[in-house]
Image: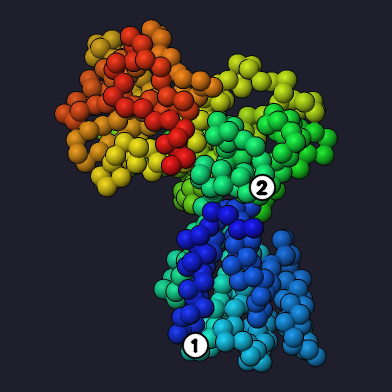
Amino acid sequence: MLIGREEEQKRLLKLIDSEYSEFVAVYGRRRVGKTFLIRETFQYRFTFQHAGIYQGKKPEQLKAFHNSIKDAGLKNISVPKTWLDAFEQLKDVIRQSTEKKKIIFIDELSWLDTPKSDLIMALESFWNGWASARKDVVLIVCSSVTSWMLNKVIHNKGGLYNRLTERIFLEPFSLKQCEEYVEKNGLIMTRYEIIETYMILGGVPYYWKFLDKSLSLPQNIDRMFFAKNAELKDEFAHLFSSLFRYPEEYIKIIHALATKNNGLTRSEIINATGISGSGSLSTKLEELEKCGFLRSYNAFGKRSKDSVFQLIDPFTIFCIRFLSGKPKDGKFWINQLDTPKVNAWSGFAFERVCFWHTENIKKALGITGVLTDICSWSCKADEDKGLFGSQIDMVIVRKDRVINLLEMKFSSAEYSIDKATYESLMRKKSDFLRETGTRSSVHITMVTPFGISRNKYSGEIQSEITAEDLFD
């Protein structure tokens, strides 16, 4: 059952009615549902379909492609020795098809691109020299390796330059889409519990399928991550090894970013990891960002060369925080609830959920149509300048000369602002005004699951965002 992909499905289905051949790239991180989307949309009916073999060498990839050619109805053919030969066989499959539109689906295309394989050259020849000259081919290529898809296909500077007729980036589910998934699968969960789950699994549909409706959320987390044969115990390692041929340095970067909630600059990453500051680091950071693991931003008032890189993938953060030590307790999560470690993580994880839903926050503030810049900001204590030292994880700078300083608090009931919190908020606002010298109006916005309770300290909060807004 396909959930939450209506727009993407419409874009795929319209290709069937096109009067020309179409070349489509579908990409996104591992487990996000790319293959399922394509199969469900076309009801599992393809003129030809094939999936690359993970870590397969060129002869193995060609043999597997040959088998898929035979499954498509082409008999008495030899195993191709090159990808040019393989695509010649694919042409014969298309020629013998009587379908009005020949839908060709090649999944995990990047895995076919082994060293010195000449795959891209053969794909260029197939599309530019043959398929694009017809009017009945829909070629869909798919890959979990987002960086590879962007560099080799979408932003190709050679024969595939500007040849795609459609590109679809499949993002993780939003909270609203997760809620739809929960309802369609008979899970009984409140919106608060869905947020809690999102803080651990993110919006990756594959991970949500392991939830057992007969268990509580803590029991589910223990079963999925910490039990003896837990389904997701080793997913973190598989995730990076499937995305990158040499994942070690990528994992080093991820672990370094996990140590600092508000992120690290490029030079700080170099110091933390020992990775050379050459162009290869820039490439790795760009690839991790394109794959959705981190975001880069310029702190308010800083130049682009001072960019900060921040880990934002909930699943990755959870794995590093709680699975790195390989806990052997099958009830680890239940036994850790309400501990300082989990409480600290929950506040941080809720902030990341908010980062994934900035458009919802803007809508709740009534500024959907206003040009904005979303960043973070911090300053060090300086007695001479009258600065206390502050950190604000989300700042929305608006073109209408208003700046929202967002304070995100995860709580299981209405959040009550006490004296200490109030004074902390006032210090942050004071530091921001003094250090930036901004002439814009500065508003404090609270983001909590159930809103804030009214008391003598709540009057300084100009706006609030609740779970209802994050699901809207």
Q: What residue type is labelled 1?
A: Lys
Task: Name the spot of residue 467 as percent of width and height, x first.
Answer: 47, 33
Label 2: element kind: loop
Q: How far apart are marks 1 and 2 (CA)?
A: 40 Å
Residue found at the very far left of the displayed protein: 439
- Name which residue lies at 49% across and 87% down: 135
* Element at label 1: loop
* Residue at (46, 20) in percent of width and height: 414
- The residue under the point 54% across, 34% down is 191
Q: Position of residue 409 (x, y in %)?
A: 46, 23
Of circles 1 and 2, the one toward us is 2
Q: Which amino acid does label 2 sit on?
A: Asn
The residue that disc 2 covers is 185
Residue topped by disc 1: 135
Instruction: Reply above or below: 326 against 202.
Output: above
**Does residue 207 lie above or below 328 as drawn?**
below
Colour scheme used in the picture?
A: rainbow
Q: How crowded is mark 2: few (under 14 residues within 10 Å), some or many (20 or more)?
A: some
Residue in front for this viewpoint, 357 or 375: 357
Give the label on residue 99, or none.
Answer: none
Q: In the figure, is residue 213 to the left or right of 399?
A: right
Q: Is 406 located above or below residue 236 in the figure?
A: above
Asked where in the image residue 84 lies, by quadrant, the reply is bottom right
Residue 232 visible to the viewer = no
Residue shown at 24% from the left, 14% from the top: 385
* Quadrant housing the C terminus: top left
Question: Does any portion of residue 170 appear in the rendered image?
Answer: yes
